[in-house]
Amino acid sequence: MSHEQLDAADAGPAYRRRSGPARAWSALHALLLQSPSAFIGALILVLIVFACFIVPALLGQDGEATDLLNTFVPPVWQEGGSWATPLGTDHLGRDTLSRILIGGRISLTVAFCAVAMALSIGLVLGTLSGFYGGWIDSVIMRVGDLFLAYPFMLLTISVIALLGPSLTNLIIILALADWVTYARTVRGSVIAVRGKEYVRAAEAIGTPNRTIIRRHILPNTIAPILVLATVRAANYIIWESGLSFLGMGVPPPTPTWGIMLAEGRNYILNAWWLVTLPGLAIMFTILSVNLLGDGLRDAMDPRLKRVGK
Amino acid sequence: MQAELLRVKNLVRRYELRSGLFSRQQRYIHAVDGVSFSLNRAETLGIVGESGCGKTTLSRAMLRLVEPDEGEIIFRGRDIRSLTKEELRRERRHMQIVFQDPFGSFNPRMTVRELIDEPLSVHSRDSAAARLERVREVMAKVGLDPRLCDRHPHEFSGGQRQRIGIARALVLRPELIIGDEPVSALDVSIRAQILNLMKQLQEESGASFVMVSHDLGAIRFICHRVAVMYLGRVVEEGRTEDVFREPLHPYTRGLIDAVPVPRLRPGKTRQLLTGEIPSPVNPPRGCHFHPRCPLALKQCNSVAPAFNEVGGGRRVACHLFAPTGGIDTPAPVPVEKAGLAGRRPDQH
C-alpha cells in the first residue's frame, strides 16, 4: 500500500466497525466488488437453495405422485409438452420439475452435512496432529492411513449392511470416508503456519497454546481448507448420485439427482430430459459452489483487500 | 541501580547432526557453548559476533524459546530452566523479544491494535477499554499514529513495522527486552531512528535490554556493556567504551578493525581477520580462534583459555591475558597488551 493511501486515510478512520445487517450488507458488497465470480456463485447457490426448499411447498407436489396415463411427456417447449408438467414426466408419469427440486434438497443436504461432519473431524484431528506433532501426530495419521486403505465401496457396503440405507447413514459414510482428506490438508497447513515467525512471537509473548491455535493457526490455514471443502462438496453430490444409483444411497421412491440419472439412463434415447436436466442441476450447483469457494478464499486474504474498484 | 536482573551460567545449546540412519556416531553443533554473563537492571548488554556464532540461538535460549541443554538462567532470582511450562508462560510477561524480521513476525490477519494488544490480552486482567487506552499510549510512545490502530501490518513500511514490534514488546512494561538483530532488516536511514527510539525508551522505561547484533555501530550506540561471541563462546566482555577503545582479544580487535573507516589516522594499522569462520561441527581444539589468530601462542591449539577477569569489569578468554601468563610462557602479557593497545579504533 502506498503512502498516498495512508495519508488520505489519515483524515478519518479507514473503516469503522459496523454491526448487524449493515455489516452483513457491507461484507456482501465488498465480496461483489472484490470477486464478481464469487458473487455470481453465491447468487446461483441462493437461487438453487430457494428453489429446492421453498418452491416445492408452493407447488404442493412431492415428486412421488405417479400418473401412468401421462408417461414420457416432453418438456413444455417441445411438441406434446404441457404446462402441467413444464419439464416433462418420466416412465411413471412423475413430474420432472418437482423431482429435480425435491431431489436437490437431498443432494444439498447430503453435501452440506457431509462437509460439515468430515470437516469438523478433519479440522480437529488435523490441527492436533500438525500442532503437537510427535506421537499424537503418528497415531492420528496412522489411523487416517487405515481409513484411506479401506476401499470406499467396501466401507459403504458394510455400513449399509449394518445400518440399512438412509440419508443419515449416507452422510456418515461420506464423512467417514473423507475426513482423512481434510485432516491431511489441515495438518499440512498447520505445520506450515506453525513454523512462521509470528507463531514463535506469540510463544515468546506467553500466549497459551489454545489461543495460539485459535488466533494464529486456524485463521491462516482456513483458506486452502475452504477451497477443499467446496471441491469436496461437489464430489459428495456426485458420490451420492453414484451410491443412490447402486441402491446404497437414499432409498426410493425419494428422488435424488443420482437416482434420477440412474433411472433416466434407460430412456436416454427417447426421453433426453430425464438425464440431461438433473445433470444440469448437478453441474450448476457444483459450479456455483466452486465459484463461491474460490472467491471466499481471495476475500479472506487481508493482503488482497482492495479499497474501492 | 546495580541490582542484578539476569544471570546466565554456562548455557549450552547443541544441535544433533544426523549423519545417517545407521550411523552410531553422534555429532553435535554447539551453537551456544558454555556462555555466562550477567545483566543488571536498567542496563543494556550487546552481544556481537559474526553470522553463525550462535548469538541468535543464545537470545532464544535465554528465553527458553529453544530449550537449553545445560546451564542456568537466573531471571528475577529464579532459575527459568526449573519452571514448569505454565510458570514459564506466566513469567514471559516480564521478558519480551523484538524480532529481526518485521515482516514475518506479525500475523497478517491481525490489525495493529490486535497485535499490540495480544500481550495484554494474555497477561492482563484489564478491561478491553483500558487495554485499548494502553495500546494507544504505547503507539504514541513509539512514534506511531494511534489513529492507524485498525490497519494491518502490511500497510506499514519496514521501520513502522519495527516500531509496532517494539510497541508490542513494551506494552506489558517488561523488565527484560531482548532485541534479536532488531535493526538489521532496516534501511540505514531508518536504522538510526529505530536505534534512537530504542535508546530513549530504554532510558525512560528502566528496562534491561539485551541487544544481539552483528552491527558494531548499533551496539556501540546503544549498549552499556558488550559481549563478543565467537563460535558459541564469549571471548570478551566489558564496558562498551573500554572494549571499543582498547579491544583486548585478538578477535575483538579484528572485528572492530573490519569496520570501514574513511581515513585511517597516520601511524595506525589495521589488523584484519583472515580466513573463514571454522565449521561449528568440528571446531578447532584449544582456543576456537587460534587458526585465525595473528598472536597465537604455543598452548593456544591445545588448551582452551579460561574466561579471566582483567580488571575494570572486563573479562577476556585469551591466553595472552591469563593472570599467570599461560602455561609454558611465563608472563608475556604486558608486552602483548601494549602492542594491541597501540591503536585507537574509535575515531570513525
Image: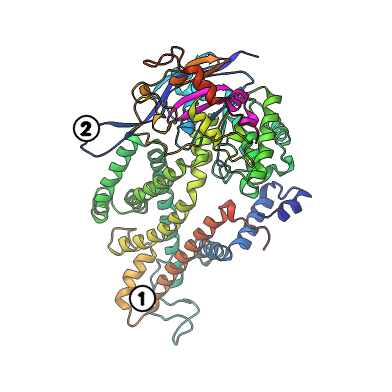
Element on which disc 1 rests: loop
Furthest residue toward front = B267
Q: What's the residue type where badge 2 is placed?
A: Arg
Please give the range of residues in magenta: B220-248
Q: Residue at x 59, y 41 (%)?
A: B260
Quarter the N terminus of chain B occupies: top right
Q: Residue A7 versus residue B237: which sits nearer the camera?
A: B237
x then y, percent, for residue A118: 39, 48
* Residue A40 visible in image: yes
Residue A118 shown in magenta = no
x then y, percent, for residue A212: 50, 36
Q: Which residue is mark 1?
A: A68
For residue A268, side relative to residue A193 (left or right): left
Q: Is residue A92 above or below residue A191?
A: below
Q: Residue at x 46, y 56 (%)?
A: A227
Query: What chain letter is assigned to the residue under label 1?
Result: A
x then y, percent, for residue A104: 44, 63
Q: Residue B10 versus residue A224: which sits nearer the camera?
A: B10
Q: Which residue is mark 2?
A: B24
Within the image, what quadrant is residue B122 found in? Answer: top right
Q: Residues within 10 Å of mark 2 (few under 14, many from 20)?
A: few
x then y, percent, for residue B50: 49, 36
Q: Which mark is residue B208?
A: none
Q: What's the residue type where badge 1 is placed?
A: Leu
Q: Residue B44 versus residue B315: which sits nearer the camera?
A: B315
Q: Is residue B276 above or below residue A181?
A: above
Within the image, what quadrant is residue B278 found in? Answer: top left
Residue B238 shown in magenta = yes
Quarter the C terminus of chain B occupies: top right
Query: What chain letter is assigned to the residue under label 2?
Result: B
